Each structure stands twice: as C-alpha cells, then as structure tokens.
Amino acid sequence: AQKITQTQPGMFVQEKEAVTLDCTYDTSDQSYGLFWYKQPSSGEMIFLIYQGSYDEQNATEGRYSLNFQKARKSANLVISASQLGDSAMYFCAMRSHLTGANSKLTFGKGITLSVRP
Amino acid sequence: DTGVSQDPRHKITKRGQNVTFRCDPISEHNRLYWYRQTLGQGPEFLTYFQNEAQLEKSRLLSDRFSAERPKGSFSTLEIQRTEQGDSAMYLCASSSSDRTDYYGYTFGSGTRLTVV
C-alpha cells in the first residue's frame, strides 16, 4: 500500500520569499512517480511538478522545484519568489509504475499556504 | 479540447434522494478516475476505468454508489439514497495509458454535493 504524509500546519510566507512544503511517502514499489498539485479555492486540481523515482536530477518547473531524497522517502516542494496567487492548498501524491498496477494517484491531506503581501 | 468537464458544478439534494454526476474526459485519454474529497482532506480514490472497463473500485464505494463509462468516453457516477456523509467534492480525472505520459492526469473542477 502507498501512503503520503503531509503534517505541516497552515504555512505562511511573505511575498517574494521562498517556501518549502514537506511531503514524505511510503511504498514498497521500486518504480513510482511523485506529484504535487495546487488546489485554489475554485476547487480545480492544478498539476505543478513530477518526479520519477529513477530520475537522477531533482525536477524543476519554473518557480517550482522538488527536493527529492529517495533514501529518506521525502519529496518536498520548494516555491521560489512566492506570489499572492500561490495562496492555495497543496497536495503531494504518488502512483505506482509497476506494469499492470492501477495508475491511480494516492494523495496526502494537503497543506494550506498563505502568501502575505 | 477544453479539458475535463464535470456537470453539475454544485448539487444540493435531500437525504434519501438519488443523484447522478457526469464527467467528460479529454477525448484522447482512455483512463478515467473518480475521487471524493471531503473538507480539509486530500482526494480519495473511488474507482477507475480504462476505456469502458471498470478495473478497480475502492471499498469506499458502497453499494449505493455506481459508476459507468458505457462507450469509453464520458462517465457517470450515481449515488442512491444519499446520506449526509456523502456531502463532498467529487472529482473526475483522466489520463492516457501511454507510459511516457506521466504528466497526463487532468482533473475537472469537480461537483460539490451537499446533502441536507
């Protein structure tokens, strides 16, 4: 079974500063993918970044980067130069890449990020 | 293609009534997923289709819940005899079975159900 843990309480960051959102995971699979999604108050889940378990480099997508530490089973999201529009819920998720495995995503409980002007 | 569409966006129903939600995935995506999200929680997997075949159902999907994807395109999720505990956001997502398309999960905006 797969499990995602997000335990941070609501996070606050000053506009233009960087913030790290924590995510740890548990799986017995050797091949898997890790995702971060943003969910604003409108409800839509917006894909931010993806990291494969065999990727040697940490993923980056614009202001988003993923600090992937495989041995520690952590996949923290770093948002640089925070903007007011970054205020939202952020979810870490994972899926197995085993052949024949269900491709569903398993989500954590999420973290609320508030960006202060 | 405008993405994954869900209808209705909001539904208020009385306890005991039946409700049906619709999801139209991205046309080239052959996989379709239903998730349920309660307030302050992450989405929980309900069920998953590849083309028209329902390949997995979560134990969260009680006998009152049924999902269909008759022609491998749109899907419906029906809840019979609704209960207050069914109040949640119901999210639909689609993806491609192409293993190189790891970015391919696209979510709809969800249907928010309130059972009164």
Image (cartoon, coloured by chain):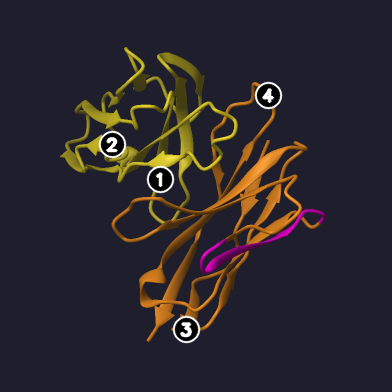
Residue at the (21%, 26%) spot, across then down = B18
Question: Is label 4 or label 1 in front?
Answer: 4
Residue at the (48%, 79%) spot, across then down = A12
Q: Colour of chain A?
A: orange
Going by the numbered disc 1, the residue's amino acid type is Gln
B69 or A80: nearer the eye? A80
As drawn, is A44 to the left or to the right of A98? Answer: left
Distance from label 4 to label 3 (Cα)? 42 Å
Magenta range: A61-71
Going by the numbered disc 3, the residue's amino acid type is Lys
Residue B78, position in %: x, y?
28, 24
Residue B64, position in %: x, y?
35, 22
Chain label for disc 3: A
Going by the numbered disc 2, the residue's amino acid type is Asp
Mark 3 and mark 1 on one chain: no
Whether residue B116 can be seen here: no
As drawn, is A35 to the left or to the right of B67? Answer: right
